[in-house]
Amino acid sequence: MVTVAQVQEAQARIEPFVRRTPVVTAVGGGLWFKAEFLQTCGVFKTRGAFNRQLAARERGELDAVAGVVAASGGNAGLANAYAAARLGVPATVFVPTTAPQVKVDLLHAYGARVQRAGTEYAEAFEAAQEYVASTGALFCHAYDQPDIAAGAGVIALEILEDVPHVDTIVVAVGGGGLFAGIAAVANDRGVRVVAAEPTRAPTLHAALAAGEPVDVSVSGVAADSPGARRLGAQGFEQARQTHPVSVLVEDEAIVAARDALWDDCRIPAEHGAATAYAALTAQAYRPASGETVVVIICGANTDPTTLGAAR
């Protein structure tokens, strides 16, 4: 399980390579947005990608010839391809044949070698593991590695530096890497974590009910973002230790929150990122009077033609 010390190490390690995103006031008193959608590559995953690759290089685990490998047709693949390009090592990204061509084109633009395998993420993941075994490339998981979670957890350190009186951090949960890093820091500092999920992709909620990570069906707006079918070990162990407030929100509420972020604040949020705000707008979580809340808006890789009035 990722620790605060690991997150602090990650902060120092990745500082030259990532943006320190601002915390901005939102609509209504006591509410703030952590504008992580402004991160390089448009998503929080860039932090974990750099931390994973840099830490592995420090440990002598990153072969400059074999490079890195990831299985993701989405944000994790883009982040790891970008990080590898900055660090001067090759990147191979396995994607299912159903991956959108626009994302494949972006992977190529970042210099990645793209390999298509199967029609689902699980098949691309298996192919990536075979590639690791045959080449010695460094595997960069989309969310379930301590280095990945620690990199994401730096967001919480920045929130606490910018809003030291914060009571609650609201974070969207998919595979659980972002949640794990945030919860590690928040729990250490006595800050509540609200973990928000779509009802059609309840990985954390289902894991807590079952007492272990279990597969869930994924549909609706969650299919692309957050998209994970099972909570990772990092997220589950952190949840067992820190006991977050776990809430579910319907697709309609997520879409409405995403529209509101654009219409009211001109924030171009992915559905996964809007899930965190929907926890408040749908009143799945109701802050107490005077409670200071920071909502992490974690990604902006979305179709701009579907935003609010642009529809």
Image (cartoon, rainbow, N blue to C red):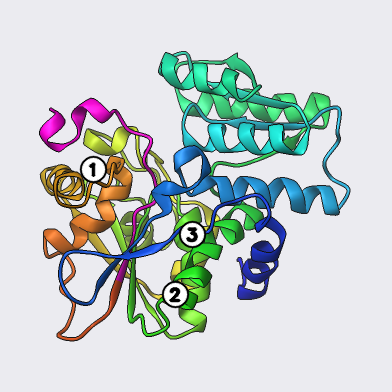
User: Do the residues bearing badges 3 and 2 touch, measured as CB atoms within 8 Å?
Assistant: no
How many neighbours does mark 2 have within 10 angstroms: few (below 14), some (14-19), or many (20 or more)? Answer: some
In this figure, which residue is indicated by the disc labeled 2? 162
Q: Is residue 225 left or right of residue 125?
A: left
Of residues 185 and 197, the one nearer the viewer is 185
- Mark 2 or mark 3, which is nearer the start of the sequence? 2
In this figure, which residue is indicated by the disc labeled 1? 200
Location of residue 28 with respect to 250 vertically, above or below? below
* Image point (18%, 47%), residue name: 254
Q: Is residue 241 left or right of residue 210?
A: right
Location of residue 294 with respect to 109 vertically, above or below? below
Q: Residue 149: percent from the left, percent from the top?
A: 57, 57
Q: Is residue 53 left or right of residue 143?
A: right
CA separation, marks 1 and 3? 18 Å
- Mark 2 or mark 1, which is nearer the start of the sequence? 2
CA separation, marks 3 and 2? 25 Å
In this figure, which residue is indicated by the disc labeled 3? 235
